[in-house]
Amino acid sequence: MARLFSSLSVSTVSGIGLSRDERYTRAQFVPGLSNKNDMKFGVQCNGRVHRRKLPKNIRYPRRAELPPEPQMSRFLNGGNGGTEQSEMGMVLDEEPEGSDDGFLADGIEGKEEGDIVWDTDEIEVISSLFRGRIPQKPGNLNRERPHPLPLPYKLRPMGLPIKKRHVRAGSSLYKQVYKNPDFLISIAREIRSLPLEDDVSSVLNKWARFLRKASLSLTIRELGHMGLPERALQTFFWTQKQPHLFPDDRILASTVEVLARNHKLKVPFSLEKFTGLASRSVIEALARGFIRRGSLSLAWKLLLVSKDNKRMLGPSIYAKLILELGKNPDKHSLVLALLEELGEREDLKLSHQDCTAVMKVCIRLGKFEIVESLFNWYKQAGNSPSVVMYTTLIHSRYTEKKYREALAVVWEMEASDCLFDLPAYRVVIKLLIALNDLSRTGRYFSKLKEAGFSPTYDIYRDMLKVYMVFRRLAMCREVCRELEMAGFKLDKETSSKLLQLEKENR
C-alpha cells in the first residue's frame, strides 16, 4: 500500500492532482491551490489512527465564524498571487484495509456519500462573485447619448393644461357667500327689521365668520338706500371692532357717501387737511354724496381743493358734476370749465352712462363738436355704442339741422343690428318728418307698434302733422281714432288745422 501511494501521482480531473505527505497518520484530504491552479490531495494511511480533539473554543464557538475577506482570500481570487494557500480540510474517517481500493476510487471520483465535490465551473462561478466589477470591452468612452424621441411618438394626443384646484374644506362655501349680493342685501333687510332699541351686532355676529374685507360695503350702501344712515353708522362701528374686516377704505368710503347723501355727515372745517389725509376713494365718495344730496357748491369746492393739493379725482366725478350743473342755466360757465379740464386729461376713462350724460349736456349747451368728439373717442377705445348713445348722436345732429348726417347714423344703427327703443323711434320719426319722407315715416311708425311700444302723444301729433302736409285725410282720421283709444285728446291748434283740412277737401 505504501508503495502504491509513494508512486501515485495522478490527475483525476483537470487541475486536480494527488501527492503523498508523510506528516499525516490518518486519511486526510488537503485541497489546495498551487501556482498552476492544481488541487492536491495528500493521502497517508498507517496502521494506527490518532483522533485529535478540537479545542473547546472551536467545538463550542460563542458566535458564528466570520466569512473570509474577499481581498485576502487567494482561493476566491483564483490563487494567482503569493505562496500562501488557504487549506480546506475535509477529514475522512478511515475505512478498513480491505476497502482501500474502493476508498481510493471513491476519493478519486468524489462520489462518497456526504462529501462535497467542487467542480471547476462551480469554483469559477463562486470566485467571480467576489472579483468586483467585470471589466468592460474597450470602446468610445465619450460617446453621445441619443436624443429623446419627439412628442408625436406618444399614442394619446396631448391634453390641454388644466388649472390645479387646491380646494380647502369649506372654502367654496365662503367664496359663494361673502361676495353674494343677495346674501349681503339680506343682512341689510334683517338689520332694517330690528327693533329700534336693538343693536346691529345681534345680526352681524351670526354672519361674522362668513364675511371678508369689503363685504359689508354693499350692506352699508343698501342701508343708505333704505333711508337708515344711523344703522349704516352702527354697522361701520361694529366693523371697526373686527380685526379681519377693518381697516378697509371701501367700507369707510361707503359709510362716508351714505352719511353725506343723507345730511348726517359733519363737513370738516378744513377741507385742505381732509384731502391731504384721506385716500382718493374716500374723497370721491364724499364728492358723490355731496352731488347726490344737491350740495353742488360743496362738491365744486372739494374738487378745487383736491386739484390744488394735486389729488386728481376720477373722471366719473367730473361727469356727474357736469350733469347736475348742466341742469341750471346759471352754472353753464362752470360746466364749460369742467369740460375743458376733462378734455385735457390723458387718462380719460368714462363709462357708457357718464359719456352719454356729458353728450346730452353738450347738446343743451350747443357744443355739438364735443358730442362728435366724445362719440368718436368712445368708438376708438374699442367700445360698441348702445342705442342710447346712437339716439343722442342722432338728436345732436337733428338739433344742429344736419339731417342727412343724422340719417347716416340711422343706417349705421340698422347695420349693427341695434334694437330700437321708444326714444330712438321718436327721434327717427322726427328726423324723417323734417326730411319730408312720408313713406319711411309711416314704415317706422308701423315698426314702433309691431315692436310692442305704445306711441306717445307727441308721436301721434307729429304723424298728424306730416299726414296733413301731404293731405292724407284718411290716415289723419285713423291716427285720431288710435289717439282717442289710447286716452289722449288733441290740442286746439291741431284740431283746428284738421277741421280746416276737412273743409278744403269737401
Image (cartoon, grey):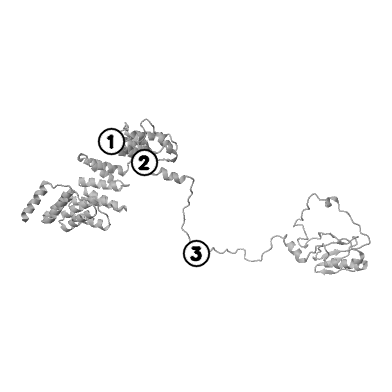
Q: Earlier in the sequence, mark 2 or mark 3?
A: 3
Q: CA distance from mark 2 to mark 1?
A: 31 Å
Residue at the outermost top position: 197
**Label 3 crowd (10 A; few <14 / some 14-19 / many >=20):** few
The answer, for residue 280, to whether it is visible in the render is no
- Look at mark 3 in the image and give the residue it sits on: 152
In the foreground, 449 or 145 = 449
Tell which of 193 and 37 is nearer to you. 193
Measured as percent of width and height from the top left, residue 29 is found at 85, 62
Dot 2, crowdedness within 10 Å: few (<14), some or many (≥20)?
some
Quadrant of the frame with the N terminus: bottom right
Specify whether 232 is left or right of 21. left
Q: Secondary structure at mark 1?
A: helix
- Secondary structure of the residue carrying tag 3 is helix
Q: Which mark is residue 396?
A: none
**Residue 492 percent across, percent down from the top left:** 10, 46
Relative to 48, 17 lies left or right = left
* SS under mark 2: helix
Specify few, some or many for label 1: CA neighbours under 10 Å numbering under 14, 14-19, or 20 or more. some
Which residue was labeled with disc 2? 185
Q: Tell which residue pokes out farthest to the front in this image.
A: 485
Residue that carries the numbered disc 1 in the rendered image: 298
What amino acid is at disc 3? Pro
